[in-house]
Image (cartoon, helix red, strand yellow):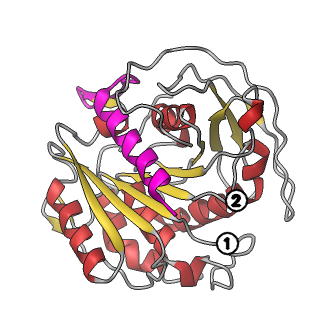
Amino acid sequence: MMRSSFLRRLIPLILVLLVIPACGDDSSGEATDTTLTPTTVKAVTTTTAAPTTTTAAPTTTTITTVPLQGTGPYEVATTVVSHPSTQDIWVTAPSASDADEWGTWPIVFATHGRGGSGDGLAATAAELASHGAVVFAPTYRSTEGQYIEQDLECAYRYVTSIAQDYGGDLDQPVTSFGHSLGASMALFGGLSEAAYGPGGTYDACFSGVPRSDVIVAVAGCHYEYEGEQFPFDMTGFSNMDADVVLVAGTEDDVCELWQSQDATEELQAAGYDARLVEIDGGNHANVVFYEIVDGEWLLRPDDPVGEEVAQVILDAINAAP
C-alpha cells in the first residue's frame, strides 16, 4: 500500500526508466590515498555477526564469500541479511579483525539501478569498505514500481537498526549512494524528510528515522530517456541539511551529463548544498566497475573510473560535518 506521494511523483520517471537496460549487475572511513591501484582479487571467509533490532527479529542470515577487495588498507568481508519487511541486503564492511577501529565506521546505503541487485554494487562496496565504511546494498524490486518505495525505505530503516552490529557508527555521517535509477531513489528518499523522517507519514514498516547526511547520485536520468521527458520534481524535499553530490560521466549515453548538470542547478536554486562532479571518460557502466559488451554487463573490479567515483563518495563522507 502506498501511504505517501513519493511513488506518485516518481511514476513518470519510473515508467521511462523501466525500459533502460539493467543499470546494475545481472551477475553475480577515510580514504588514505587518491592514487588508486588495481583491485586485489582475494576470497574472504566471513564470520557470523548476528543482527539485532528493537522492533523485529531478522530472518535467517546467510554468510557468503565475495572474492573482491578494494585498494584501501582494510580487508573486507560480505554478509547477506534480511528482515520480513525487506529483500536481501548485502553488507560489506572492514573485517572484524581490525579490532582497534571496530565500531567506528560511517555507513553507506547503496542503491542499484533498474534490473540489478544489491550484489551488483559489490566492487564499489568493496572499494568503500576497504577505506573504512560499512556498505549496505539492498536488493529492491526495481522493475515492479509498486514495490520500490516499500523495499527501499524499509531496508533503510532496518539498516539503521543493525548498523552497529557490523561496525557502523550512526554518530558519523550517514550516506545514501545510488546508481542510475538508484540515483533518483537516493535523492528522493534522502531528501523527503517529511514523509520518511521521524514523525513522518510513511508507516509501512518500523518508525521513521533521520534522513541521510550525504547523498551521492551517480549517472541519474533526471529528466529524459531517449526523448521521453519527465519532471525533476522536488515536491516533498525538505532535508536541507544534506550534502548532495551528483556524479556524471562525460561519455554517458544513457543518462547524459546535461541531466545531472541541470538537476544540480535546480537543487542549488532551491537552496540545497549541491554540487556536480564530472567524470572524464565515465560512461553509464564503468562508473560502478562494469563494461557493457554485446549488451551484457561485465564486472571490471579494477576499472580506474569506478575507483574515481568511489573516491568521490569517500571525499563526500570525509567532508561532511
Q: What is the crowding at mark 1: few (fewer than 14 residues within 10 Å), some, or many (at least 20)?
A: some
Q: Nearer the viewer, residue 164 or 12?
A: 164
Choose between 240 and 157: the one closer to the eye.
Answer: 240
Q: How far apart in space, not on screen, are marks 1 and 2 (Cα)?
A: 8 Å
From this view, report whether residue 87 is shown above or below residue 6: above
In magenta, the rendered stretch is 292-321
Q: Is residue 313 magenta?
A: yes
Q: Tag 2: Cα neighbours inside 10 Å, few (<14), some, or many (≥20)?
A: some
Residue type indicated by callout 2: Thr
Per the image, the residue denoted by label 1 is: 209
Is-magenta flag for residue 173? no
Q: Residue at x 56, y 19 (%)?
A: 67
Percent x, y for residue 36? 37, 26
Name which residue type carries label 1: Val
Question: Disc 1, disc 2: CB below 8 Å?
Answer: yes
| Helix, strand or loop at mark 2 | helix
Q: Tell me the residue that label 2 is attached to.
A: 160
**What percent of the width, then of the height, locates residue 54?**
87, 63
Quarter placement of the N terminus: bottom right
Going 52% across and 37% down the picture, which residue do you hit?
125
Q: Position of residue 298 (x, y in %)?
A: 35, 25
Q: Is residue 195 above or below residue 139?
A: below
Residue 116 picture quarter: top left
Residue 84 can be seen, yes or no: yes
Q: Secondary structure at mark 1?
A: loop
Say which mark, if any, is on residue 29.
Answer: none
